[in-house]
Image (tube, rainbow, N blue to C red):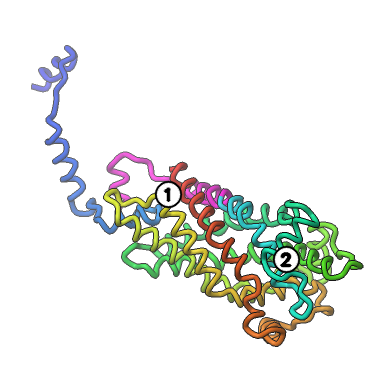
Amino acid sequence: RRSSAVRRKKKGVTMTVPSNVLLQSFRSVLDSPGMSVSHARRGHAIATGFAHPADSAFVAASGAEPQSALVRSAKDVFAGTCGGITVTLVGHPFDTVKVLLQTQSATNPAYKGPLDAASKVVKSEGFKGLYKGVTSPLAGQMFFRATLFFGYARAKEIVGVSPDDPMSYARAGLLAWMAGSFFESPIDLFKSQWQTQIVQAKQNPNYVPPYKTVGECVKASFKHNGIRGPYQAFGATLIRNLPAGAIYFGVFENTKNYLAKTHEDGKPRDWEIMFAGGLGGFFYWSLFYPVDVIKSAMMTDSINKAERKYSGFLDAGSQLYKQGGLRRLYAGLVPCLLRASPANAGMLFVVDKVKQLLG
């Protein structure tokens, strides 16, 4: 019989197997112990971008080559870099106005509000004035977001996120922002120091900026404070980032998962990804904004410790409150929220799409 089968093959006779037989065979493999892929695990893979560990056997059986950790990491880094470019280009003008309003004097303000601040900057320096100091945050955000989304992907693996456990995304987000803060804090410091020179120049015509370039600011930081220099107000950064970061990714992922369930294919639409990202950004900033005001005050304080106005986080908060009560702690909220939704919607959409395109 075996020789007969071979002869038929040589003669070009093709043996066909009914499609229903193939389908039943395939299903029997999937349904066998250790090989079944539950709906929850499919949801896990769709929502997180990572297969459930128990499904590795299915990957091997299907003949698909699992991606190496290096490849996955490279994709996370590249997607995060693209997200950093997006969030900077969309959000920097709003961020400039926010810093101007946050750091101006409460007794002698240079600006009446966000529109007044933006119009005065454009009038004196042109539209490019709203992008003053963008070089440092652009390069910094590319690096920071790359590390943030790399860290978030690894944190999701460590935590073992699942749509069945909504808080798992918050835990992964907290871990990711904890790691990301070590990169974000120096970027924020030098950007804030550079931007605040605009405020000083508006308030005092005789003001001479201490730094002509961001590089000079970096050098001064190391000169006065050594290796800890770039981490001025790092404690305030952590106080904001840890709870805010947990809420940020928690809101984004759970909103995206909820909207995905409304479709037969279980995939969120583009506008839903952007909506989820914008909502995450809104909660990130709105719930912890006073902490950000205190952080900005500490970051725009003198780099030289001997010349600083604030001795720490509580002292900065106390002094700011004395200047204007709760209203002082919410200075610049409007431009911040105007920036938060579109910038984060664009960033998270770009990151999500880039990772989809990369496979």
Q: Quarter of the image for the N terminus: give it.
A: top left
Q: Quadrant of residue 311?
A: bottom right
Q: Residue furthest left?
A: 1
For badge 2, the amino acid type reads: Ser
Closer to the N terminus: mark 1 or mark 2? 2
Q: The disc labelled 1 sits on which kind of residue?
A: Asp
Q: Position of residue 340 (x, y in %)?
A: 56, 62
- Residue 18 in which image quadrant: top left
Q: Is residue 234 magenta?
A: no
Q: Is residue 285 above or below residue 215?
A: below
- Which one is in front, 232 or 345? 345
Point out residue 284 in the picture as x, y percentages from the top left corner.
Answer: 52, 68
Which label sits on residue 270? 1
Please name the predominant secondary structure of the magenta segment in the image: helix
| Quadrant in the rendering for residue 240 | bottom right
1 vs 2, front mark: 1
Crowding at label 2, few (<14), some or many (≥20) Cα neighbours within 10 Å? Answer: many
Give the camera-side residue of 98 and 277.
Answer: 98
Residue 41 relative to residue 98: left or right = left
Tell me which segment is drawn in magenta.
Answer: 54-82
From the top left corner, tell me how far across and down residue 185 is, in percent: 66, 66
Q: Which residue is mark 2?
A: 192
Instruction: Give the camera-side residue of 86 and 21.
Output: 86
The residue at 32%/50% (across/down) is 56
Image quadrant containing the C terminus = top left
Specify whether residue 90 is in view.
yes
Q: Give the alpha-carbon distance from disc 1 to disc 2, as whole Å.
A: 33 Å
Q: Residue 75 magenta-drawn?
A: yes
Q: How many marks?
A: 2
Report helix, strand or loop for mark 2: helix
